[in-house]
Amino acid sequence: MMEHEKIITRSSLWSNIFKSESNEEKILDLLKKFPAFSDLKKRELKMIRKLVQVREYLPNEIIFYEGDPGVSMFIIESGKVEISHTFKSGIKQELALLFSGDFMGEFSAIIEGYRTATATSLTETRLLIIFRPDLLELIHREPTLGVKILLGFSKIFVEKLRNLNRDYLNLYELLHFEKQLDK
Protein backbone atom coordinates (compact mmCIF):
# COMPACT_ATOMS: atom_id res chain seq x y z
CA MET A 1 0.00 0.00 0.00
CA MET A 2 1.35 3.43 -0.93
CA GLU A 3 1.81 6.05 1.78
CA HIS A 4 -0.96 8.32 0.42
CA GLU A 5 -3.40 5.35 0.42
CA LYS A 6 -2.70 4.76 4.11
CA ILE A 7 -3.58 8.37 4.89
CA ILE A 8 -6.86 8.18 2.97
CA THR A 9 -8.03 4.98 4.66
CA ARG A 10 -7.29 6.46 8.10
CA SER A 11 -9.68 9.30 7.41
CA SER A 12 -12.89 8.95 9.41
CA LEU A 13 -14.89 9.76 6.29
CA TRP A 14 -13.41 6.81 4.41
CA SER A 15 -13.39 4.41 7.35
CA ASN A 16 -17.10 5.05 7.96
CA ILE A 17 -17.88 4.26 4.34
CA PHE A 18 -15.89 1.03 4.52
CA LYS A 19 -17.53 0.05 7.81
CA SER A 20 -21.03 0.51 6.42
CA GLU A 21 -20.18 -1.66 3.41
CA SER A 22 -18.88 -4.44 5.63
CA ASN A 23 -21.94 -4.07 7.89
CA GLU A 24 -24.17 -4.53 4.82
CA GLU A 25 -22.31 -7.73 3.98
CA LYS A 26 -22.68 -8.92 7.58
CA ILE A 27 -26.43 -8.31 7.43
CA LEU A 28 -26.71 -10.15 4.09
CA ASP A 29 -24.71 -13.05 5.59
CA LEU A 30 -27.08 -13.21 8.58
CA LEU A 31 -30.09 -13.18 6.28
CA LYS A 32 -28.54 -15.98 4.21
CA LYS A 33 -28.08 -18.08 7.37
CA PHE A 34 -31.73 -17.66 8.37
CA PRO A 35 -33.34 -20.97 7.24
CA ALA A 36 -36.27 -19.35 5.40
CA PHE A 37 -33.85 -17.33 3.26
CA SER A 38 -31.01 -19.84 2.86
CA ASP A 39 -32.00 -20.84 -0.69
CA LEU A 40 -32.29 -17.25 -1.95
CA LYS A 41 -29.92 -15.72 -4.47
CA LYS A 42 -27.92 -12.62 -3.55
CA ARG A 43 -30.27 -10.39 -5.59
CA GLU A 44 -33.25 -11.81 -3.67
CA LEU A 45 -31.47 -11.37 -0.34
CA LYS A 46 -30.92 -7.72 -1.21
CA MET A 47 -34.69 -7.36 -1.68
CA ILE A 48 -35.19 -8.80 1.82
CA ARG A 49 -32.44 -6.51 3.15
CA LYS A 50 -34.49 -3.49 2.09
CA LEU A 51 -37.17 -4.61 4.57
CA VAL A 52 -34.80 -4.95 7.53
CA GLN A 53 -34.89 -2.46 10.39
CA VAL A 54 -31.99 -2.50 12.85
CA ARG A 55 -32.58 -1.82 16.54
CA GLU A 56 -30.22 -1.84 19.49
CA TYR A 57 -31.31 -2.85 23.00
CA LEU A 58 -29.69 -2.21 26.35
CA PRO A 59 -29.05 -5.00 28.88
CA ASN A 60 -32.30 -6.15 30.57
CA GLU A 61 -34.49 -4.28 28.08
CA ILE A 62 -37.71 -6.03 27.10
CA ILE A 63 -37.90 -6.70 23.36
CA PHE A 64 -41.49 -7.96 23.56
CA TYR A 65 -43.84 -9.27 26.24
CA GLU A 66 -45.80 -12.49 26.23
CA GLY A 67 -49.30 -11.62 25.02
CA ASP A 68 -48.20 -8.69 22.84
CA PRO A 69 -49.47 -8.75 19.26
CA GLY A 70 -46.82 -10.33 17.06
CA VAL A 71 -46.06 -8.14 14.05
CA SER A 72 -42.40 -8.88 13.38
CA MET A 73 -39.59 -11.38 13.55
CA PHE A 74 -36.04 -10.86 14.78
CA ILE A 75 -32.58 -12.11 13.86
CA ILE A 76 -29.88 -11.49 16.45
CA GLU A 77 -26.88 -9.73 14.94
CA SER A 78 -25.05 -9.49 18.28
CA GLY A 79 -25.83 -9.93 21.94
CA LYS A 80 -27.73 -12.38 24.10
CA VAL A 81 -31.52 -12.73 24.47
CA GLU A 82 -33.52 -14.68 27.04
CA ILE A 83 -36.88 -16.16 26.07
CA SER A 84 -39.06 -16.78 29.13
CA HIS A 85 -42.59 -17.63 30.20
CA THR A 86 -44.29 -16.56 33.40
CA PHE A 87 -46.84 -19.03 34.72
CA LYS A 88 -50.12 -17.98 36.34
CA SER A 89 -48.51 -18.77 39.70
CA GLY A 90 -45.98 -15.98 39.01
CA ILE A 91 -43.06 -18.34 38.49
CA LYS A 92 -40.83 -17.26 35.62
CA GLN A 93 -39.21 -20.01 33.56
CA GLU A 94 -36.35 -19.47 31.13
CA LEU A 95 -37.17 -21.31 27.90
CA ALA A 96 -34.12 -20.47 25.80
CA LEU A 97 -31.01 -18.37 25.50
CA LEU A 98 -30.38 -16.99 22.02
CA PHE A 99 -27.17 -15.60 20.55
CA SER A 100 -25.82 -14.06 17.34
CA GLY A 101 -27.39 -15.74 14.30
CA ASP A 102 -30.38 -17.09 16.25
CA PHE A 103 -33.90 -15.91 15.46
CA MET A 104 -37.24 -15.46 17.21
CA GLY A 105 -40.79 -14.46 16.38
CA GLU A 106 -40.72 -16.17 12.98
CA PHE A 107 -44.39 -17.22 13.24
CA SER A 108 -45.30 -13.53 13.52
CA ALA A 109 -43.59 -12.81 10.20
CA ILE A 110 -46.26 -14.87 8.43
CA ILE A 111 -49.38 -15.17 10.62
CA GLU A 112 -51.17 -12.84 13.01
CA GLY A 113 -51.13 -13.88 16.63
CA TYR A 114 -49.88 -13.06 20.07
CA ARG A 115 -46.41 -13.56 21.52
CA THR A 116 -46.20 -16.81 23.46
CA ALA A 117 -43.18 -15.75 25.54
CA THR A 118 -41.23 -12.69 26.68
CA ALA A 119 -37.92 -11.75 25.07
CA THR A 120 -35.36 -9.79 27.10
CA SER A 121 -31.92 -8.60 26.02
CA LEU A 122 -29.36 -9.76 28.58
CA THR A 123 -26.48 -7.78 27.08
CA GLU A 124 -26.22 -4.93 24.63
CA THR A 125 -28.05 -6.50 21.72
CA ARG A 126 -28.44 -5.58 18.07
CA LEU A 127 -31.40 -7.06 16.22
CA LEU A 128 -32.49 -7.22 12.61
CA ILE A 129 -36.26 -6.79 12.49
CA ILE A 130 -38.60 -7.72 9.63
CA PHE A 131 -42.20 -6.57 9.95
CA ARG A 132 -44.99 -8.84 8.65
CA PRO A 133 -46.74 -6.18 6.50
CA ASP A 134 -43.47 -5.43 4.68
CA LEU A 135 -42.68 -9.11 4.12
CA LEU A 136 -46.21 -9.92 2.92
CA GLU A 137 -46.13 -6.96 0.53
CA LEU A 138 -42.87 -8.29 -0.97
CA ILE A 139 -44.38 -11.80 -1.25
CA HIS A 140 -47.37 -10.39 -3.16
CA ARG A 141 -45.24 -8.12 -5.35
CA GLU A 142 -42.69 -10.86 -6.20
CA PRO A 143 -44.66 -14.15 -6.31
CA THR A 144 -41.73 -16.35 -7.39
CA LEU A 145 -39.63 -15.02 -4.52
CA GLY A 146 -42.69 -15.29 -2.28
CA VAL A 147 -43.00 -19.02 -2.95
CA LYS A 148 -39.33 -19.51 -2.02
CA ILE A 149 -39.78 -17.52 1.19
CA LEU A 150 -42.97 -19.35 2.21
CA LEU A 151 -41.36 -22.73 1.51
CA GLY A 152 -38.43 -21.65 3.68
CA PHE A 153 -40.75 -20.68 6.53
CA SER A 154 -42.62 -23.98 6.09
CA LYS A 155 -39.36 -25.85 6.70
CA ILE A 156 -38.88 -23.96 9.96
CA PHE A 157 -42.44 -24.64 11.10
CA VAL A 158 -42.25 -28.35 10.21
CA GLU A 159 -38.95 -28.73 12.07
CA LYS A 160 -40.40 -27.03 15.16
CA LEU A 161 -43.47 -29.26 15.00
CA ARG A 162 -41.28 -32.37 14.72
CA ASN A 163 -39.28 -31.24 17.76
CA LEU A 164 -42.50 -30.56 19.69
CA ASN A 165 -43.85 -34.01 18.80
CA ARG A 166 -40.59 -35.62 19.91
CA ASP A 167 -40.65 -33.70 23.21
CA TYR A 168 -44.30 -34.63 23.76
CA LEU A 169 -43.62 -38.32 23.16
CA ASN A 170 -40.59 -38.26 25.46
CA LEU A 171 -42.66 -36.61 28.20
CA TYR A 172 -45.51 -39.07 27.66
CA GLU A 173 -43.09 -41.99 27.93
CA LEU A 174 -41.55 -40.55 31.09
CA LEU A 175 -44.94 -40.00 32.75
CA HIS A 176 -46.17 -43.43 31.64
CA PHE A 177 -43.02 -45.08 33.00
CA GLU A 178 -43.41 -43.28 36.36
CA LYS A 179 -47.04 -44.49 36.59
CA GLN A 180 -45.84 -48.06 36.04
CA LEU A 181 -43.32 -47.70 38.86
CA ASP A 182 -46.04 -46.41 41.23
CA LYS A 183 -48.13 -49.57 40.77
Image: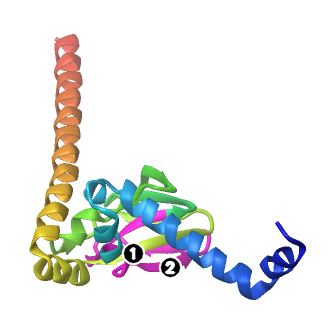
- Sequence order check, earlier mark of 1 and 2: 2
- Residue at the (36%, 81%) spot, across then down: 50
Q: Residue at x 23, y 19 (%)?
A: 178
Looking at the picture, tell me which residue is in the foreground, 165 or 132.
132
The residue positioned 42% from the left and 58% from the top of the image is 83
Residue 102 lies within the magenta run? no
- Residue reaching furthest front? 2
Q: Which quadrant: the C terminus?
A: top left
Q: Is residue 91 something one can see in this rendering? A: no
What label sits on residue 129 in the rendered view? 1
Magenta residues?
48-76
Q: Residue 173: x percent and y percent? A: 18, 22
Q: Pick whichever, 7 or 120, lies toward us.
A: 7
Judged from the image, the secondary structure of the residue bearing numbered disc 2 is: strand
- Give the structural element (helix, strand or loop) at label 1: strand
What label does residue 55 carry, if any?
2
